[in-house]
Image: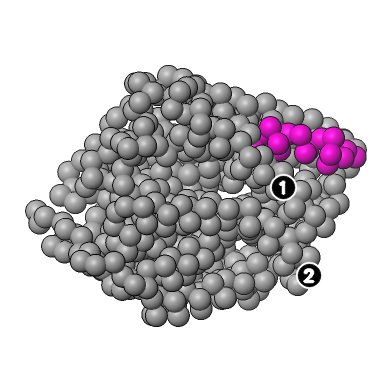
């Protein structure tokens, strides 16, 4: 097998800071697109006459394609060329966004969102790899990744706020069409400021592994969506079984592949595997709860899209304020304590949200719960990437980094499909019991989702308590892999 050596410039690129500005700004669009549509979905559902299942797939199609293809996207960028992959990814993302913004049916919108995810899976790792090459070491590297991480890390909050503004004052379609601006900035900036780089000596792509994991995840997620008609129905069991078989086949392929998409040695470490599972749980909770939170704020409480987007920021601000505290506690308390206490705290916030009522108030029933959830999440997101990357061999750093983010996206789409099944079941039970009308039934559904997310967080806490072992020093910053995780 060929030795893979990155082709790096011998001297710092004088255009690197301009390139950082362009890449960080365009990376923002990849992250915010996971949440910006949440605010617009109530209007999109009405206009396109989407069913609740189709509504879920507007989100799921994006995160499933993004998460399943992220590892392959990173390898393509390394071998084919990072600048080339970045530009193709940005162009494709922009065109897919235009298609989604002009969609005249639910099928078109879902297909466009899936295509967005495909190109995002090429764009995101290419952007991060370009920064790795342009800032190979030293203080400048730390500054560049701090800027990149800050911009990308705020993407979810920006998405909710921007989605509210666009839906309120323009139209829900602009939540997709706005990506044209980012695409133009990314393409022009890449032409002017970014140099090409690639890995020499390798061009192997694990196509069999990619097909197995992609179709396996798709079958699994689709099986969960069919569960709304019954867990014992032949179609439900068939798709769930097919998904599990294909994922088992993926593991077998990776164990034998010369250049695997996912080197299995990465997940054989107990603590690292636990970090990936916890990241998946956080993805499920965050992506699932924000969607149903938006529906509760707009449909039940009657908030405008703008106010709903701003109201959701209570959780984001709580996380931002608490994160420095978590960072200071990590070296002394260790990741196990933080990653056990964090999910339990967030679960308490979710339980708070289960007490929502059809005639309730945001400030008494929602605000406090969001703040508690945000505080708990901060104690997870600070150590989880450290645990996932510490001790990773240099040759596996990129794959481990991508897997952290794949875990969050895949956890999000699986979790959302499960939570949608829970939601529909609760709504049907409330309606069958002769409740107080449609709004009350919807409230019961939202409450059931929040309860399911609380249970998911408790499971994450159990995983942290039982799988994370080792000394506190195991997450010292100097031991981290040099390639950081993609954010979002």
Q: Which residue: 59% across, 24% down?
A: 344
Residue found at the very far left of the displayed protein: 1
Q: Residue at x 28, y 35 (%)?
A: 391
CA gap, disc 2 and disc 1: 18 Å
Q: Is residue 250 left or right of residue 184?
A: left
Residue 193 badge: none
* Secondary structure type for disc 1: loop
Q: Is residue 195 above or below residue 385?
A: below
Q: Is residue 360 magenta?
A: yes
Foreground pick, 269 / 372: 372
Place of residue 154 in the rendered image (x, y in percent of width and height, measured from the top left) = 58, 53
> Residue 196, percent across and down?
28, 72
Q: Nearer the viewer, residue 140 or 302?
A: 140
* Residue marked by disc 2: 169
At which x and y percent is residue 255?
21, 40
Asked if the residue at tag 1 contacts the one at tag 2, i.e. Cβ–Cβ closer than 8 Å, the answer is no
Q: Residue furthest front?
A: 139
Mark nearer the N terminus (2 vs 1): 2
Give neighbour class at mark 2: few <14, some 14-19, many 20+ (Cα, 10 Å): few
- The residue segment tinted magenta is 357-374
User: Residue at point 20% right, 60% down?
Assistant: 6
Q: In this orientation, which residue lies closer to the viewer: 359 or 85?
A: 85
Question: Which is more toward the observer, 398 or 390?
Answer: 390
Q: Which mark is residue 312?
A: 1
């Amino acid at each position: 097998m060929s030795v893979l050596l990155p082709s790096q410039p011998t001297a710092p690129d004088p255009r690197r800071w301009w390139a950082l500005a362009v890449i960080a700004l365009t990376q923002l669009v990849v992250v915010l697109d996971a949440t910006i549509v949440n605010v617009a979905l109530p209007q999109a559902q009405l206009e396109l006459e989407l069913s609740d299942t189709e509504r879920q797939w507007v989100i799921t199609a994006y995160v499933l394609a993004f998460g399943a293809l992220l590892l392959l996207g990173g390898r393509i960028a390394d071998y084919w060329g990072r600048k080339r992959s970045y530009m193709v990814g940005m162009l494709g993302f922009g065109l897919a966004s235009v298609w989604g913004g002009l969609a005249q049916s639910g099928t078109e919108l879902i297909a466009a969102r899936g295509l967005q995810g495909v190109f995002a899976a090429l764009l995101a790792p290419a952007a991060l790899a370009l920064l790795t090459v342009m800032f190979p070491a030293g203080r400048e590297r730390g500054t560049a990744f701090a800027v990149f991480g800050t911009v990308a890390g705020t993407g979810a909050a920006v998405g909710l706020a921007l989605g509210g503004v666009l839906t309120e004052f323009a139209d829900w379609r602009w939540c997709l069409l706005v990506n044209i601006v980012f695409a133009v900035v990314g393409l022009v900036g890449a032409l002017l400021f970014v140099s090409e780089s690639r890995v020499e000596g390798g061009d192997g792509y694990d196509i069999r592994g990619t097909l197995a994991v992609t179709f396996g995840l798709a079958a699994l997620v689709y099986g969960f969506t069919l569960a709304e008609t019954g867990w014992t129905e032949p179609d439900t069991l068939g798709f769930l079984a097919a998904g599990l078989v294909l994922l088992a086949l993926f593991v077998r392929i990776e164990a034998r592949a010369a250049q695997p998409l996912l080197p299995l040695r990465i997940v054989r470490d107990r603590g690292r595997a636990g970090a990936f599972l916890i990241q998946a749980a956080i993805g499920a909770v965050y992506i699932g709860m924000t969607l149903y939170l938006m529906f509760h704020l707009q449909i039940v409480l009657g908030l405008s899209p703008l106010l709903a987007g701003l109201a959701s920021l209570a959780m984001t601000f709580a996380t931002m304020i608490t994160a420095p505290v978590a960072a200071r506690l990590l070296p002394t308390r260790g990741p196990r304590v933080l990653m056990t206490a964090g999910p339990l705290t967030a679960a308490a916030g979710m339980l708070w949200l289960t007490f929502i009522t059809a005639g309730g108030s945001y400030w008494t029933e929602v605000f406090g719960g969001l703040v508690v959830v945000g505080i708990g999440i901060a104690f997870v997101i600070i150590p989880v990437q450290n645990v996932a990357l510490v001790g990773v061999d240099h040759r596996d750093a990129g794959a481990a980094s991508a897997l952290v983010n794949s875990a969050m996206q895949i956890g999000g789409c699986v979790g959302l499909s499960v939570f949608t099944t829970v939601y529909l079941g609760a709504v049907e039970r409330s309606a069958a019991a002769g409740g107080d009308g449609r709004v009350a039934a919807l409230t019961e559904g939202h409450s059931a989702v929040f309860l399911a997310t609380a249970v998911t967080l408790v499971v994450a806490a159990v995983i942290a308590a039982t799988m994370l072992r080792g000394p506190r020093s195991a997450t010292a910053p100097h031991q981290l892999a040099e390639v950081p995780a993609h954010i979002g």
